[in-house]
Amino acid sequence: MIDLGDVRTIVWKELKELLLQRGTTRRGVLASIIVPLVMLGIFIPLQEGARWVQSPMTPLVWIVVPVFLVATMICDSFAGERDRRTLETLLASRLSDQSILFGKIAAYVMYGWGLTLLGLTLGLITVNVTAWHGELLLFPLRSIAFTLAMSLLGAGFAGTGGVLISLRAATARQAQQTMSWVFMGLMFAGGIIGSKLPATWKVAAAQYLAGGTLVKLALTALLIVAAIDVVLALAAMARFQRSKLILD
């Protein structure tokens, strides 16, 4: 059973370790929050000005960046506990398997999605202060709704997939290497599969993309990523067996 109080305990533990980088406060905050926010939330909006809120690259950046940040950080979730020899202590606690698992996933998803919210807000403040012409600059409603939803699901994808890898890895370094190979494999596989698809499938896909409204296409993308998140979460639940993890 999932106990929300226990989940909050794990979330707080993970966020504290993530942001403080195992005790190094200044380096932790600088690396995991300040640098991405300064670069993507201030510097780039400052350079782009009013164009930043209309650019199609802005949603893309804030969808992709959390995925890579979460994927990098979450490799430490269980494999890092093994490195520090704290996994046995965690697993010996009264916390349920599901509370530990989903607490860790939730912490890193909150980190990735929280950066998106902060970065977009900071960017809006930057462009409105520096490019003010008497009218408030805001994102188109559909654009920002899709960006926030896909960013959340993307962080969930990286979180659930990263936990699954971290559960199997002996060390955090091995987990990071595996994650890198997985991302490279996905990119190559996508290219190969796309080139091998039957011509009729490609025509059908092109017709769907050409004839579909942006709302329909956005919802389709969201549903696909959500389904992948659910599958990965179920796989992580099946893999998370306390007795085997302790023996490992």
Image (cartoon, rainbow, N blue to C red):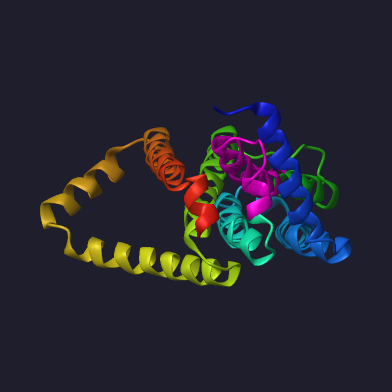
Magenta residue check for 233: no
Residue 193 visible somewhere in the drawing: yes
The number of numbered discs placed on residues in the rendered structure image is: 0
Residue 165, percent from left and from top: 48, 58
Residue nearest the viewer, comparing 175 with 203: 175
Q: Say if the magenta span includes residue 109.
A: yes
Q: Residue at x 82, y 38 (%)?
A: 134
Q: Quadrant of residue 82?
A: bottom right
185 horizontally vs 145: left or right: left
Picture layout, residue 135 above or below residue 115: above
Q: Is residue 238 above or below residue 48?
A: above
Give the residue at x 38% y 42%: 231
- Residue 66 location, x and y as percent? 61, 53
Task: Choose between 7 and 245: the one closer to the eye.
Answer: 245
- State left or right for residue 134 relative to residue 69: right
Task: Work out which residue is located at the far right of the displayed protein and give it.
Answer: 26
Q: Nearer the viewer, residue 9 or 53?
A: 9
Q: Main secondary structure of the magenta part?
A: helix
> Position of 134 compared to 230: left or right?
right
Give, as a single range, the part of the protein colored magenta. Answer: 88-117
Q: Looking at the image, can residue 53 be seen?
A: no
Q: Is residue 144 above or below residue 59?
A: above
Residue lying at 25% horizontally and 61% vertically, measured from the top left: 194
